[in-house]
Amino acid sequence: MAAKPVIVTRPAREAAQWVGDFRAAGLAATALPLIAIEPAADAEPLRAAWRRISDYAALMFVSAAAVEHFFLYAEKNAVAPGPRFWATGPGTARALRRAGVPDEAIDAPPPDAVSFDSEALWQRVRAQVSQGVRVLIVRGGDAAGNPKGRDWLANEVDAAHGLRDTVVAYRRLPPAFGDDERALALEGAEGRAVWLFSSSEAIANLRLTMPETSWRAASAVATHARIGEAARAAGFASVRVCNPQLEALIASIESFS
């Protein structure tokens, strides 16, 4: 039996890459971004962070979007010599390389890590933080530009007596659905396609955008246990959790056939 189509919910740029990878592997895949990425409302904090780049022992990036929007304001030769660059996963690490950061300056979980998150990253970098070491966390924000997301790693820096600043590089907004997007979401709600979630925020945005929809017949693959819990809480009855590597994702999607 052929695998069900997969609905990729990552922001548009990342979704396009994943859709291409799935199609190359023989799966029917369609992008339905559930997080819209927009520039920061105020760029001055980003410019100020680059002016102070020498103050930081490390810069932590929560996503590839954080890298791309932060480096829009990079000053010439700001990267080398410079701080360590922390990435939560392979996509963020690739974005750093595209931005010109050398491999030897990047710290990230290994490719075979069980999960790609702040906890896995911290295991790699915790020895770098001690009394007075300053870290900049580059992350997304809400519509008003306020920082948005988990504070777990920031709290670990605090506990290690480090100093940390936060800068909002971009805004994460709910999607705007038209008729085509709503029809695709209903296919997923009825179980005719498998949802792929890599963010609990995406699930929250889906529920916000389609508040009257039941997800009891829907199936989902989640790339982290926390995301799987969010999917179950939303009403998804069938949820698989797996490592966000292509082969593992394909196997999980195909298990719903």
Image (spheres, rainbow, N blue to C red):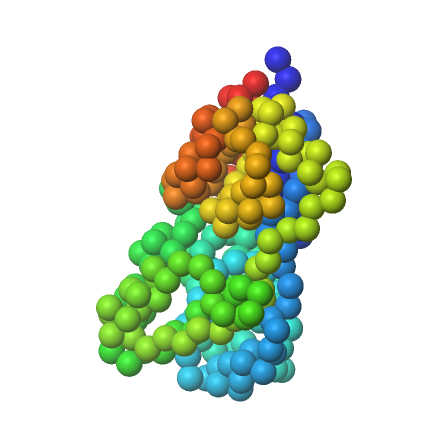
Residue 150, picture quadrant: bottom left
Query: Residue at the front extreme?
Result: 212
User: Number of numbered discs present?
Assistant: 0
Quarter of the image with the C terminus in it = top right
* Left or right: 88 as drawn, with respect to 73: left
Furthest residue in direction right, as rendered: 179
Q: Residue at x 43, y 49 (%)?
A: 116
Residue 228 position, x and y percent, is 42, 37
* Residue 101 visible in this rendered orientation of the protein: no
The answer, for residue 36, to whether it is visible in the render is: yes
Q: Position of residue 177 (x, y in %)?
A: 69, 46
In the image, is residue 138 above or below residue 230? below
84 to 182, vertically: above or below: below
Question: Looking at the image, which residue is at 52% across and 58% down?
Answer: 63
Q: Quadrant of residue 180?
A: top right
Q: Nearer the viewer, residue 123 or 152?
A: 152
Of the pair 56 and 180, the residue shown nearer to us: 180
Which of these two is toward me, 188 or 30?
188
Please report the residue visible at 31 percent of the width from the left and 56 percent of the height from the top.
Answer: 123
Q: Position of residue 130 (x, y in %)?
A: 26, 74
For residue 30, side relative to residue 146 (left or right): right
* Quadrant of the image containing the N terminus: top right
Location of residue 41 by image quarter? bottom right
Above or below, 86 relative to 44? above
Q: Residue at x 29, y 64 (%)?
A: 156
Instruction: Name above or below for residue 160 compared with residue 207.
Output: below
